[in-house]
Amino acid sequence: MKLCYHDLYDSQFELLVVEVCKGILGRAIQGFATGPDGGRDGRFHGVADDWPSKSEPWSGKIIIQAKHTSELNAKFSDSDFGESETSILTKEIRRIKKLYDDGHLDAYMLFSNRKLGALANESILDRIASETGLCKSKISILGVEALNSLLKDFPQAISNAGINITNLPLQISPDALANVLLSIKGHLNSGVRPGRDCNNINTDFVREPFNEKNLRHGLSAEYAAEILDRVIDFYTIEDFLQNPINSDLKLTYNDALDEFTRWLLDNRMQSQSFDGLLNWLIKLLLERDSDLGRNRRLTSTFIYYMYWCCDLGFKNAASVK
């Protein structure tokens, strides 16, 4: 499960970067502090344990920067980061050059919770090198892709940074979930309907009767009626997910299901009703991604489907209480 970095506070992101750097540079890293020039840097002086590799590690004075954004799906190629006089990178380059010219920097790392494409990476590396004089091989730009990979190697960095994943809203990647929903939308809009009687269906497993499930979860009759109003779409969605050609999307569905179930368990005491829990979950999703927000009915139908087919919900009565 991916960590949704935009849900973190700036200070949490800095602590996370420090813990990751302890793994790749060494435990002697100094945490982020405001320097004489007003910038907040992390620092490491020595020989790195494993960056950029064990065979050819960096050595000397390494400056670490953490640039956090609360924007969803932010990219290094976005205008606020790029080439304008007021951009994040332009301001940072001025600081790098001064530190390098004054002998306070031998290598530089910049972490940000932005997506980093290969072309953007090369462009940023070239610009920093040309405008500061720092060797290109002594510069590393690390976005969400690198962070996700490093956290697989150093999963303890999350807890060491004091980040409690259960207190964060949702961890599933919103764009991945949106990809599933938009694919389902295309299937629904194609006019394809389930090749079976929706009132008389045989499945490979026995579902808990809908009324019993509702009673066990405390779902209101009004909410149950709203869910059943979408039943024709449920069978179409089920056919889509069971088609082997959509196996990758089914894996994303299963990841989302695992995340939503955990979220329901973590938050079951925060709502007076299961109706409220489902509405809360749907609201979070609508706020997380523009594609989900533009497809409000489909997003709610997706959650209703998960509940209706017994994928989503509590497995026993004790969990409901």
Image: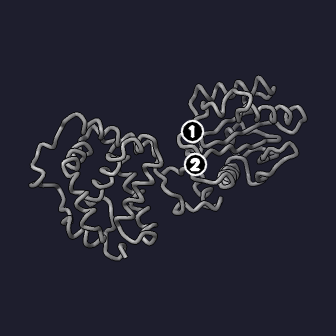
Badge 2: few (under 14), some or many (20 or more) residues near its Cα, within 10 Å?
some
**Can you name the residue that lies furthest to the right here?**
102
**Residue 174 located left or right of residue 302:** right
Is 161 drawn above or below residue 122 in the view shown? below
Count of numbered circles in the view: 2
| Pointer 1 local density, CA inside 10 Å: few below 14, some 14–19, many at least 20 | some
User: Residue 64: x and y, percent?
Assistant: 74, 43
Label 1 residue SS: loop
Instruction: Let me know if residue 23 appears in the view.
Output: no
Name the amino acid, label 2: His
Question: Which label belongs to residue 236?
Answer: none
Asked whether disc 2 touches disc 1, contact meaning CB atoms under 8 Å apart, the reply is yes
Q: Residue at x 45, y 67 (%)?
A: 267
- Under tag 2, what secondary structure? helix
Residue 247: % across, % down: 31, 42
Q: Determine which quarter of the picture holds residue 269.
A: bottom left
**Residue depicted at x 22% and y 47%:** 233
Provide residue 2's location: percent of width, then percent of height.
Answer: 50, 49
Q: Which mark is residue 6?
A: 2
- From the viewer's side, name the closer residue of 250 and 266: 266
Label 1 sits on what residue type?
Ala
What residue is shown with label 1? 74
